[in-house]
Amino acid sequence: MRPEGANYFAYLLCRKAPRLARAALAEAIGSRVPGIECAGGNEGPGPLLFLYPRAAESGRPPPQFALAVQPPPAPALVGPAIAQSWQWPDAGAAAGACQAAVIATDVFAHDVPRQARLDLFQRAVAGSLAALPCEAMLWLPSQQLLRPANFLAALDGRSRNPARRALAGGGRARDRPAAAHGRGPRARKEVTAALAKT
């Protein structure tokens, strides 16, 4: 399977490669995205595919959320994010301790309205965090590492920090796409590589 167009994505950094447990992830993600269904995939390294709920069939592949285990992102990607993670002085140490990553992305979702798509993706990521041993999150477009707890607080509206709300899709509307939308040739190449194994 190959992703179409620009995908939303995040790296969920882990100390060691986690096992993607279908039942646990389906329950955790379903608690945040009612109606999402596990479409299958490989337990263990993945990828696992989840179908977003849809109001009507369009004859196109349904929008999907995917998770796959892979090596951690290259230092060339992590280094600038560490430098920009001013809100987390220990971001470099946290990232350095991680020997694996779970890439979270959406597939075939480019027709979903932007704000609805971002909301679905971020809620699916939040659900994934409940079932994965994630130490840090890398959002390449914002070039920052985030503590998972800070992402959840911002997403759930518990953060007073406007920068954190923007990273989680809240705050000013003009901040949302830049904070969470994965664009660019390197991002597409890594997403494609992770999902091409299915």
Image (cartoon, helix red, strand yellow):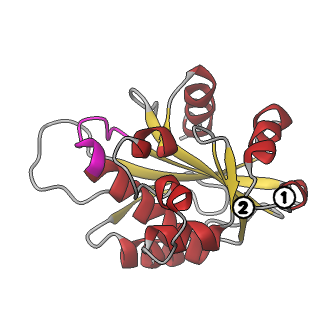
Residue that extends furthest to the left in the rendered view of this protein: 56
Measuring from the top left, give residue 121's x and y in whole percent. 41, 55
Q: Is residue 105 visible?
A: yes
Q: Is residue 181 left or right of residue 101?
A: left
Measuring from the top left, give residue 19's x and y in whole percent. 69, 67
Q: Secondary structure at mark 1?
A: loop
Q: Which residues are magenta?
A: 107-115
Q: Amino acid at mark 1?
A: Cys
Residue underneath mark 1: 98
Residue underneath mark 2: 136
Q: Which marked residue is nearer to the observer: mark 1 or mark 2?
A: 2
Q: Amino acid at mark 2?
A: Ala
- In the foreground, 85 or 188: 85
The CA span between labels 1 and 2 is 9 Å
User: Residue shown at 48%/71% (left/top)?
Assistant: 127
Dominant secondary-structure state across the stretch colored magenta: loop
Mark 1 and mark 2 residues within 8 Å of each other at the beta carbon: yes
User: Residue shown at 60%/25% (left/top)?
Assistant: 189
Q: Choose the circle earlier in sequence order: 1 or 2.
A: 1
Question: Quick one: label 2, few (<14), some, or many (20+) residues within 10 Å?
Answer: many
User: Residue shown at 64%/68% (left/top)?
Assistant: 148
Measuring from the top left, give residue 113's x and y in whole percent. 22, 43
Question: Quick one: label 1, few (<14), some, or many (20+) residues within 10 Å?
Answer: many
Q: Is residue 22 visible?
A: no
Query: What label does residue 189 carry, if any?
Result: none
Relative to 69, does residue 131 appear above or below in the rendering? below
Measuring from the top left, give residue 52's x and y in whole percent. 30, 57
Q: Is residue 112 magenta?
A: yes
Q: Secondary structure at mark 2?
A: strand
